[in-house]
């Protein structure tokens, strides 16, 4: 009564037609019949893929630089930043003759992300001072064994001849979020936008 | 060809067709459920998912076969066998078509034209409850027993109304043979015109007899975790589930034969076709009608929620039974008024 929203319930006697239920059943069956011809909500997954947001955070990639050397220096900031504690790594010193493989004197000899632990928050990407780890628009495929979800360097580091484009995710908003990032490859999207706006 | 050989071939053909239809009814059920819920349904096994029943069957085969150690082993095995047997036995008296003329001889597309076909049908249908009852009892499980008790009391209750609905039909047709009932509808007027109320009662009771929604209380998952087949696994569970689909197919065939002219269709004699071609078309038409009713069974299942048990008994005893009695009297009065008795 305080809100004046109470509704008085009336227990109405059902008429004979209502008690026969057949008209109600008939109208219900018309509804289900109508639904047969309606558009289906299903997306037939492997053939059809649902469009994902440009900032979608999927499977990680460990980037190489322009010359093809691994950027990661095994500083461990990503592992520290990770709230799910999904990242482990082992650091090693670069030997003579490995300059083309690793960018700096220290590198990760082992780098593992447990995809079952990972919550895809993107804090590793934000923490990385070397522009080495990025989240991509790729979906982590499912497998039958738990161990197969622990991704090592074989799955994380991008192949030299098959680079992973991470610029799609780097929208102006994301770049703003990571404003201390000033490496060139991280800015390709921004540069493109700047170019377009200067054309206009 | 020897008439007995032809009968043997016909028996095997009806057996195979019944199983095949039931097999694809499981697939149809899933597809229809899906499209009514705005989904797509099984579409992965084979083109359009057409091999799905095969995959389901293989899955059923591969499952571990469990027999509870506290159950009565033989009764436990006999239960699903009876369910399957009685489901398949009913196909014998249904006229699947007219006469075929092969090598100068005439063969009827009905396995046997019993002059008490309807009685036979009801006898076999009421035997069906034994499969469920024995299966539920032998499981030695509370849920199974509850489901079995529900099933038997439900089937017995609805058989009465069903039988009374049929009595009115027998009064107006004057025969117990299914072949003759179908032949009488040759003229183009189906029995539903004479027996609309009887048809409605029969249809509702057919739903109850086949344990289909909204009368699927014996096997409701939410209350009885499957009812009488809770303890069953592997192929024996498959038998129970399969028997339901066979029952659905046979019930549809019976409904069509009784009330919708069987294999007859309007203006069939104006087509100017000779015997065999007409017979084959008639059989096709008969199956089309059956498939419509199988679809109808599924359509109802995915529309109407389940009854409460007291509502079920109320409907059976206090609504359908009096209605069936009124129908008998009404039929009698109309027949007397028309001067038929």
Image (cartoon, coloured by chain):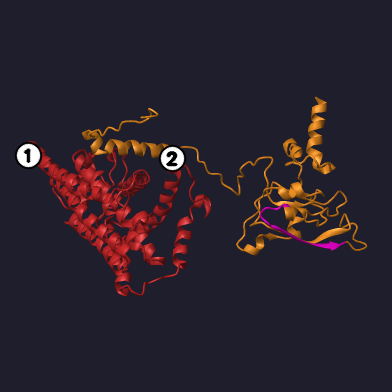
Chain colours: A orange, B red
Residue visible at 45% across and 57% down? B53
**Residue receiving disc 1:** B336
Q: What stretch of residues is rendered in magenta?
A: A81-93
Q: Is residue B161 above or below residue B62?
A: above
Q: Is residue A175 above or below residue B57?
A: above
Residue visible at 79% across and 28% down? A197
* Residue B177 x %, y %: 18, 53
Real-space Cα separation, disc 1 to disc 2, in angstroms: 46 Å
How packed is label 2: few (under 14 Cα within 10 Å), some, or many (20 or more)?
Answer: some
Q: Residue furthest top?
A: A200
Q: Is residue A89 magenta?
A: yes
* Residue A39 or residue A146, whichever sits in front: A146
Q: Is residue B284 left or right of residue A87?
A: left
Q: Residue furthest front?
A: A2
Q: Is residue A58 magenta?
A: no
Residue visible at 29% across and 71% down? B75
* Residue B17 x %, y %: 36, 57
Q: Are marks 1 and 2 on the same chain?
A: no
* Residue A153 x %, y %: 76, 59
Q: Chain of mark 1?
A: B
| Figure quadrant of residue B22 | bottom left
How packed is label 1: few (under 14 Cα within 10 Å), some, or many (20 or more)?
Answer: few
* Residue B62 or residue A25, whichever sits in front: A25
Given this view, does label 1 or label 2 mark the residue nearer the observer? 2
| Figure quadrant of residue B143 | bottom left
Q: Secondary structure at mark 1?
A: helix
**Residue receiving disc 2:** A36
* Residue B18 x %, y %: 35, 57
Q: Secondary structure at mark 2?
A: helix
């Amino acid at each position: 009564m305080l809100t004046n929203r109470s509704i008085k319930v009336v227990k109405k006697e059902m008429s004979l037609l209502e008690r026969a239920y057949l008209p109600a059943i008939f109208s219900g069956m018309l509804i289900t019949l109508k639904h047969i011809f309606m558009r289906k909500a299903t997306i037939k997954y492997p053939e059809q893929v649902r469009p994902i947001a440009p900032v979608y955070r999927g499977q990680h990639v460990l980037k190489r630089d322009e010359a093809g050397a691994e950027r990661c220096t095994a500083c461990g900031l990503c592992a520290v930043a990770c709230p799910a504690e999904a990242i482990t790594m082992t650091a090693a010193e670069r030997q003579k003759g490995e300059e083309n493989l690793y960018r700096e004197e220290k590198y990760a000899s082992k780098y593992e992300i447990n995809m079952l632990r990972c919550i895809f928050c993107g804090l590793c990407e934000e923490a990385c001072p070397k522009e080495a780890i990025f989240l991509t628009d790729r979906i982590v495929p499912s497998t039958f064994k738990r161990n197969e979800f622990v991704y090592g360097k074989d799955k994380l580091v991008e192949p030299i001849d098959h680079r992973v484009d991470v610029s799609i995710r780097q929208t102006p908003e994301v770049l703003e979020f990571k404003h201390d990032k000033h490496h060139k490859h991280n800015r390709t999207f921004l540069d493109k936008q700047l170019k377009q706006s200067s054309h206009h | 060809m020897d008439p007995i050989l032809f009968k043997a071939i016909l028996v095997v053909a009806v057996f195979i067709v019944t199983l095949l239809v039931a097999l694809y009814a499981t697939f149809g059920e899933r597809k229809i459920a899906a499209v009514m819920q705005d989904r797509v349904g099984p579409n992965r096994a084979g083109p359009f998912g057409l091999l799905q029943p095969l995959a389901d069957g293989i899955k059923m085969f591969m499952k571990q076969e469990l027999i509870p150690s506290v159950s009565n082993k033989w009764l436990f095995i006999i239960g699903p066998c009876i369910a399957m047997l009685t489901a398949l036995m009913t196909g014998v008296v249904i006229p699947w078509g007219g006469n075929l003329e092969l090598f100068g001889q005439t063969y009827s597309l009905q396995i046997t034209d019993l002059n008490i076909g309807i009685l036979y049908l009801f006898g076999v249908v009421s035997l069906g409850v034994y499969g469920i009852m024995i299966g539920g009892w032998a499981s030695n499980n509370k849920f199974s027993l509850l489901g079995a008790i529900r099933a038997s009391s439900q089937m017995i209750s609805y058989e009465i109304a069903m039988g009374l609905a049929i009595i009115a039909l027998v009064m107006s047709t004057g025969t117990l043979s299914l072949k003759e009932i179908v032949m009488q509808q040759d003229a183009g007027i189906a029995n539903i015109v004479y027996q609309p109320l009887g048809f409605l009662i029969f249809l509702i009771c057919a739903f109850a007899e086949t344990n289909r929604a909204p009368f699927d209380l014996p096997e409701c998952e939410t209350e009885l975790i499957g009812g009488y087949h809770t303890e069953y696994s592997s192929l024996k569970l498959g038998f129970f589930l399969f028997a339901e689909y066979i029952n659905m197919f046979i019930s549809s065939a019976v409904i069509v034969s009784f009330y919708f002219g069987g294999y007859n269709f309007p203006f069939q004699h104006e087509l100017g076709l000779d015997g065999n071609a007409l017979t084959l078309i008639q059989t096709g038409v008969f199956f089309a009608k059956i498939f419509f009713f199988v679809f109808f069974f599924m359509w109802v299942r995915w529309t109407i929620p389940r009854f409460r048990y007291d509502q079920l008994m109320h409907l059976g005893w206090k609504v359908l039974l009096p209605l069936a009695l009124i129908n008998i009297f009404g039929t009698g009065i109309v027949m007397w008024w028309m001067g038929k008795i």
